[in-house]
Image (cartoon, grey):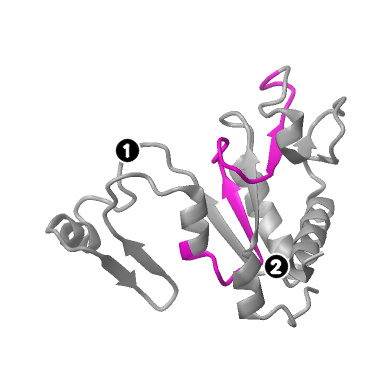
Amino acid sequence: MMENSTSQASRSEIGPLVVSFVARSNTGKTTLLQSLVPHLKAHGVKVGVLKHHSHPTPFDVPGKDTYRLFDSGADRVVGASPVQVATFKPVTAAPTLEALVAEEFGDVDIVLTEGFKLGPYPKFEVYRKERSEQLFCEERELLAIATDTPLNVNVPQFALDDIEAMAAFLFAASAVRASGA
């Protein structure tokens, strides 16, 4: 379990570990992350997930109250329920990944992004031979690979279904980052 001695102040000084899960479309990024999050949580890791939405459409749905209030010109709309809070605010340009991490994830140990293939953070590629004969990223960008076949690269590789090993690897990386080592 992650040490609770990592205070909010020290975490915010170095920020969370950010790892971008990348792959070609329909390779299984979301499914992998959906399985990985509970395993990280079992290690005591506070996990944030940031999903890249490349389509120029809003997240909110036309006809919903939050959408109607946002559409009326509100500068910010927050929907709150007993189980979730969602914030909607206009942007004139897509925020940078670094800005989103700093603004939204200061209280977590690790941020797993889905997509953001051009971002500056280390990448964990999900690779399926049936989707491509070559990796999506260059080897120097990769932290690790989840794969259905062994690859001739010099980065850690995990079987696609070895979620516990991937979680342990990411837990160790976040613990090292939190310790400042």
154 left or right of 40?
right
Secondary structure under the numbered disc 2 in the rendered image: helix
Residue at the extreme left? 72
Give the residue at x 82% y 47%. Answer: 162
Mark 1 vs mark 2: which is more N-terminal? 2
Point out which mark residue 56 bears. 1
Q: Is residue 120 magenta?
A: yes
Q: Position of residue 64 (x, y in %)?
A: 22, 58
Secondary structure under the numbered disc 1 in the rendered image: loop
Q: Quadrant of residue 171?
A: bottom right
Q: Is residue 168 magenta?
A: no
Please tell me whether mark 1 or mark 2 is closer to you in this view.
Answer: 1
Q: Position of residue 10 (x, y in %)?
A: 66, 76
Give the residue at x 29% y 59%. Answer: 89
| Dot 1 crowding, Cα within 10 Å, few <14, some 14–19, many 20+ | few
Point out which mark residue 41 bears. 2
Q: Is residue 79 placed above or below 60 in the rendered structure? A: below
Task: Give the magenta-colored segment's residue range.
Answer: 103-132
